[in-house]
Amino acid sequence: MSRLVDRFGRTHDNLRISVTDRCNIRCVYCMPESVEFLPKAGILSFEEIERIARVAASLGVTKLRITGGEPLVRSSLWILIERLTAIDGIRDIGLTTNGILLADQARKLYDAGLRRLNVSLDTLDPGRFLAMTRRTGLEDVLAGIEAAHAAGFERIKLNAVAIKGFSEPDLVPLAKFAREKGLELRFIEYMPLDAKDAWERSKVLLMDEILDTLRREIGPLSPVAGDDPHAPATLFAYDDGIGRLGFIASVSHPFCRSCNRVRITADGKLRNCLFAVDEIDLRALIRAGADDAKLARAFVDSVADKWEGHEINTARFIKPDRLMHSIGG
Ligand code: SAM
Ligand code: SF4
């Protein structure tokens, strides 16, 4: 039975684990060009992550998602996946990656037990990829997706952040590509966790605006229910039966009411919301010799303190000090 129920009746069974704050590209909406990364000793070891996941599982967590930074820059990540897969109670492990290193690692990750994969890709145009990520690498991402298919991954999702004034030319090519390749494309509304405080509400390309374009350019789309009532994406299916489309519409359609997630940063801070301003330092507890009961208490306390919602759309919104890459999106 879950012990992670908050004041609003939300049960938390989903833990997002950031395994690094480092990244091999520099998406403009996520991190600055030059960053001071955490020292290696500050990052949780695989043993520490596994222990935290075990404690979380004992409290009712059944789903894990590995993220970062870029998780595939963490050496031998598949070993961690193997260990997490073996934890009693963990039924589902996912990974979110920029795909650059995926071609090399897809098979090892699959063999380690990973089955759910989200690949982030905002554009299919090399020049626009460079503008968005400040790096080259589009071909590597595409090769990574092919390799993941070949390794056996079945339901690969494609994540694309949509920024008004930039992303409009990418909407239709990405949607067509996803339909052709059998990928579920999810557009993510641009969120205020970027490096340069460049976020403004007027730069968010909203779900309804994207839907209008795709309906006009590709064809009718109708709302559909997903398999998981807690999944953040609002889903649509093409009326011709070829493919589905999702939106993580954190700004225009916040999904806080059904949130079931807690997060661990790469340096072991427990966060009860992507936009949380308070954290509990699990790394400090672990390294000071805390027992599992103390770690469990930290989870229970964190969830008990969770607020109702992120308030992006109100004057009360407080932008967290951390940027997306150091939280784990
Ligand atoms: N490096 C991996 C990747 O890009 O998939 C995993 C970490 S990344 C922080 C996780 C997701 O957050 C990505 O899909 C990325 O596009 C998204 N993201 C990053 N910054 C964002 C922002 N300011 N608004 C919305 N989504 C953002
Ligand atoms: Fe790296 Fe992912 Fe952030 Fe892009 S979104 S800079 S790939 S961590």
Image (cartoon, rainbow, N blue to C red):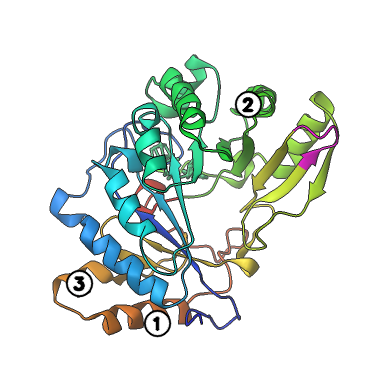
Give the CA distance from mark 3 to mark 1: 16 Å
Residue at 52 percent of width and 30 percent of height: 149
Task: Pick whichever of labels 3 and 2 is earlier in the sequence.
Answer: 2
Please tell me in which quadrant of the rendered image residue 313 appears: bottom right
Mark closest to the chain's N terminus, 3 or 1 = 3
Label 2 near label 3: C-beta < 8 Å? no
* Left or right of residue 157, residue 32 in this image: left
Give the x, y percent position of residue 164: 62, 34
Numbered disc in front, either 2 or 1: 2
Q: Is residue 187 left or right of residue 209?
A: left
Looking at the rendered image, the disc whose residue lies closer to the viewer, 3 or 2, is 2
Real-space Cα distance between discs 2 and 1?
A: 44 Å
Question: Which residue type carries mark 3?
Answer: Ile
At numbered mark 3, what does the secondary structure look like: helix, strand or loop? helix
The magenta stretch is 237-242
The disc, 2 or 1, on the residue closer to the chain's N-terminal end is 2
Residue 294, compared with residue 50, is above or below; it is below
Task: Residue type at mark 1: give it.
Answer: Asp
The amino acid pointed to by label 2 is: Lys
Which residue position is annotated with label 3?
286
- The correct choice, above or below, for 315 with respect to 146 in the image is below
Q: Which residue is mark 2?
A: 181
Could you tell me which secondary element the residue under label 2 belongs to? helix
User: Height in image: 92 above or below 123?
Assistant: below
Would the CB of label 3 be found within 8 Å of ligand 1? no
Residue corresponding to mark 1: 301
